[in-house]
Amino acid sequence: MESRFEISLLMDFYGKLLTEKQQYIMDQYYNMDYSLSEIAENQETSRQAIHDLIKRCHKTLLDYEDKLNLLERAQKAQQVKVEILGILKEKNWNSSEIERLLEEL
Amino acid sequence: MESRFEISLLMDFYGKLLTEKQQYIMDQYYNMDYSLSEIAENQETSRQAIHDLIKRCHKTLLDYEDKLNLLERAQKAQQVKVEILGILKEKNWNSSEIERLLEEL
C-alpha cells in the first residue's frame, strides 16, 4: 500500500467519487486512525471485509489518478506557484494581491 | 441538453472516465459532427440506442462535474491568471518567465 499521506491526498481529490459508506470507512481508517478491527466492530462485519473494502477503494483511487492525474497536476501547480513567488521576490516585486491570487489557484 | 461546447469541455475533463466505446461515440457525435443515424449505422445498432447512450454519458459527465467541479475550478483559475497578468501589466512588471509559468497552471 501507498503511504497514509498519499492515500489521504487521493481521498481529497477523488473521495467524492466513492460511495458514502466507502468514504466513511476510509475516513475512519486513514484520518481518524481507527483499526480494522474497531471499524469492523462498528460496522458489524468482519475485519477481513473491512480490509477488502479499503484495498478496493485504494485501487479505485489509484485508477482515478491514473486517468485524471489530479494529484500529479496539483503537485506541479504547487511547484509553479513557488517558482512565480521566487521570481517576484528576486525582483523585489511585492504584491500581496498576487500572492493572494496565487493561493486561490 | 447543454451546449455542444460545454459537453466538449466536460469530455476534456472527464472523458477518460467513460468506457472506450462511450468515448468513441461521444467524440463522433460532439467533435466529428456525425448524426445519430450515421453513428447508429456504423455501430450496427438503432438510432435510439445511440441517443440513449449519449444521454447517459451526458448525465455521467454532469455527475462527475457535480462531485469534482473541475470545469468550474478551471474557469476560476483562468480568471485568476487573467487578474495576475493584469496586475503585472498595470505595474509594468514585465516577465515572460512568469507569463510562461502561468500558462503551465
Image: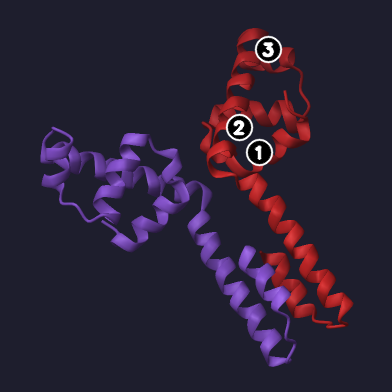
Chain colours: A purple, B red
Q: Quadrant of the N terminus of chain A?
A: bottom left
Q: Chain of mark 1?
A: B
Camera sees residue A105: no
Residue count near mark 3 (Cα–Cα under 10 Å), binned few <14, some 14–19, many ≥20: few
Give the Cα distance between marks 1 and 3.
26 Å
Viewer-nearest residue: B1 or A28: A28
Residue A8 at what x, y percent from top left?
36, 56
Give, as a three-letter code, the residue at label 1.
Leu
* Dot 3: element: helix
The chain letter under disc 3 is: B
Per the image, the residue denoted by label 3 is: B41
The chain to which mark 2 is attached is B
- Same subunit, tags 1 and 2: yes
Residue at the disc numbered 2: B62
Amino acid at circle 3: Glu
User: Dot 1 lies on which element?
Assistant: helix
Q: In this rendering, would B70 be left or right of A2?
A: right
Q: Position of residue B4 (x, y in %)?
A: 77, 31
Three-letter residue code for mark 2? Leu
Q: Label 1, label 2: how many angstroms apart (C-alpha)?
A: 8 Å
Circle 1 crowding by C-alpha within 10 Å: few under 14, some 14–19, many from 20: some
Earlier in the chain: of badge 1 and badge 2, it is: 1
Residue B24 is at least partly visible in this image = yes
Residue closest to the eye, B85 or B100: B85
Tell me which label, 1 or 3, sits earlier in the chain.
1
Report the front residue among B42 and A84. Answer: A84
Tell me the crowding category of disc 2: few under 14, some 14 to 19, or many 20 or more residues within 10 angstroms, Cα based.
Answer: some
Label 1: which residue? B10
